[in-house]
């Protein structure tokens, strides 16, 4: 019996992880495939700016869900809504694999309308998942919320691994054909085309959708209501009291019933939500916008190692949280401060690009890669712990958990967009050129 229970629990954990993987794998896939897509679509390197705006508009989904919960509580069927948005993502990924390179004339200029429209649909699905997937997980014990965040970490890891296998962004420096002893970058052809990458996205979204469908049949049953005809001994055996089984008088029960219901908006819950918003602003908005600036001056291999190892540290930190859960507010605050310190270092490297400190040294490469690993790992652990603690506060808490995750991500992305794309505060190094010569 115990062995059967263990197998069932492991199977459910796998389903939860695959379900969580589908939450952000679409947007992550769009980002990692950009270096290949921009060489084909007419928007060129303006495409990241378009994508950032489309993701921002994707927040219309969470707004609509939050307003429905507020003005018509109980009217939203979460399971049905999840099925709808997952089906929408699967269909959009199919059309993206087929029509991603098609262009349409708009006001006399060519634009990749199919790609942009489908990217918006996928962004809408991803943004809405934060306020639907998390509340659904309230039906499971707290340990499964940690597995869900492991799956979210895999949503960034898998696309990066496939993109590396595709050979995204690989180049070699060759002697100039003009004979003036300069080096010119030659970008290597990818190992497989863009449409194959988007078919991979379709496969991952389909697996996530099937996992959710199977998960709906593994929802743990709710605790049975007390039997009014049962003897006190039977009731105590099924529902032992927290005070060690001591009898409770009717007067004590009346006192408990008369106590006012606890509000969700306690100082501790507000503190946790603020930490959650800040962590997501940094990990989903601020630092990803400047990762190339902080890593590429040290070389393309440094950039790839930072991306891959950072995305490995995400699910690894979530896995650690399944066994070691820090409940101390001071401990969580200290962890956030430590993560912010690494974030500040990486921002400083980006601001000093293309000539950051320790350029051309092994120490500089090691330091930047470790900084990305620790930064992602600390905040990933922090998000899982906060999600687990909020799970204990009820269904509404997980709804607000999703809202703050999305709000933090949005604020982080919008705050960096003008600095990167409009004011050009950060400068990229030119390939195969000594950017720091006197």
Image (cartoon, grey):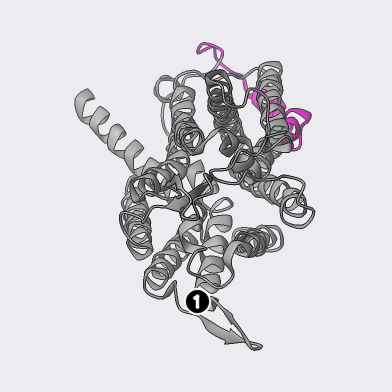
Along the line of sight, which residue is nearer the eye, 230 or 292? Answer: 292
Residue pictured at 64% horizontal, 26% vertical: 253
Residue pictured at 46% horizontal, 33% vertical: 305
Q: Residue 274's image quarter?
A: top right
Residue pictured at 46% horizontal, 59% vertical: 36
Q: Position of residue 374 (x, y in %)?
A: 56, 24
Instruction: Answer above or below: position of 81 versus 295.
Output: below
Whether residue 76 is visible: no
Residue pictured at 61% horizontal, 59% vertical: 48
Along the line of sight, which residue is nearer the eye, 327 or 232? Answer: 327
Q: How many marks?
A: 1
Q: Position of residue 90 (x, y in %)?
A: 39, 65
Q: Residue furthest front?
A: 179
Along the line of sight, which residue is nearer the eye, 102 or 398? Answer: 102
Q: Quadrant of the C terminus?
A: top right
Q: Position of residue 413 (x, y in %)?
A: 69, 50
Q: Quadrant of the N terminus?
A: top left
Per the image, label 1 sits on a secondary structure element best described as: helix
User: What residue span does the magenta drawing correspond to?
Assistant: 243-272
Instruction: Answer above or below: position of 27 versus 153.
Output: below
Q: Residues within 10 Å of mark 1 (few under 14, many from 20)?
A: some
Q: Position of residue 309 (x, y in %)?
A: 45, 31
**In the rendered structure, does residue 318 fall within the stretch colored magenta?**
no
Along the line of sight, which residue is nearer the eye, 232 or 400? Answer: 400
Whether residue 67 is visible: yes
Check disc 1 and report the residue beneath it: 114
**In the rendered structure, does residue 254 fall within the stretch colored magenta?**
yes
């Amino acid at each position: 019996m115990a062995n059967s229970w263990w197998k069932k629990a492991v199977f459910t954990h796998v389903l939860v992880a695959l379900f969580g993987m589908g939450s952000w794998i679409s947007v992550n896939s769009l980002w990692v495939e950009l270096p290949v897509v921009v060489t084909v679509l007419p928007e060129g390197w303006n495409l990241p700016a378009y994508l950032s705006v489309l993701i921002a508009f994707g927040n219309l989904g969470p707004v609509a869900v939050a307003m429905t919960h507020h003005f018509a509580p109980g009217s939203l069927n979460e399971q049905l809504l999840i099925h709808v948005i997952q089906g929408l993502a699967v269909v959009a990924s199919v059309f993206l694999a087929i029509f991603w390179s098609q262009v349409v004339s708009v006001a006399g200029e060519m634009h990749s309308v199919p790609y942009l429209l489908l990217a918006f649909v996928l962004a809408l699905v991803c943004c809405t998942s934060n306020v639907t997937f998390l509340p659904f997980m309230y039906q499971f014990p707290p340990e499964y919320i940690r597995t869900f965040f492991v799956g979210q970490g895999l949503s960034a890891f898998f696309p990066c691994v496939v993109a590396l296998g595709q050979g995204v962004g690989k180049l070699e420096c060759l002697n100039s054909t003009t004979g003036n002893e300069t080096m010119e970058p030659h970008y290597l052809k990818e190992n497989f085309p863009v449409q194959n990458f988007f078919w991979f996205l379709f496969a991952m979204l389909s697996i996530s959708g099937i996992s959710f469908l199977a998960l709906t049949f593994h929802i743990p049953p709710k605790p049975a209501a007390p039997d009014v005809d049962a003897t006190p001994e039977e009731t105590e055996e099924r529902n032992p009291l927290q005070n060690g089984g001591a009898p409770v008088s009717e007067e004590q029960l009346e006192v408990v019933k008369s106590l006012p219901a606890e509000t969700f908006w306690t100082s501790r819950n507000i503190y946790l939500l603020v930490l959650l918003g800040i962590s997501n602003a940094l990990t989903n908005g601020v630092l990803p916008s400047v990762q190339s600036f902080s890593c590429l001056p040290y070389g393309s291999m440094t950039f790839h190692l930072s991306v891959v190892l950072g995305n490995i540290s995400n699910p690894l930190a979530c896995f650690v949280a399944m066994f070691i859960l820090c409940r101390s507010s001071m401990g969580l605050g200290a962890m956030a401060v430590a993560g912010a310190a690494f974030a500040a270092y990486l921002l400083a490297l980006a601001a000093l690009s293309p000539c950051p400190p320790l350029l051309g040294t092994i120490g500089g490469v090691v330091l930047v890669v470790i900084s990305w690993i620790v930064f992602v790992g600390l905040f990933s652990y922090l998000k899982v712990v906060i999600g687990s603690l909020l799970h204990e506060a009820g269904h509404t808490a997980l709804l607000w958990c999703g809202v703050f995750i999305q709000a933090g991500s949005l604020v982080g992305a919008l705050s960096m967009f003008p600095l990167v794309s409009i004011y050009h505060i950060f400068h990229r190094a030119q390939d195969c050129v000594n950017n720091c010569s006197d």
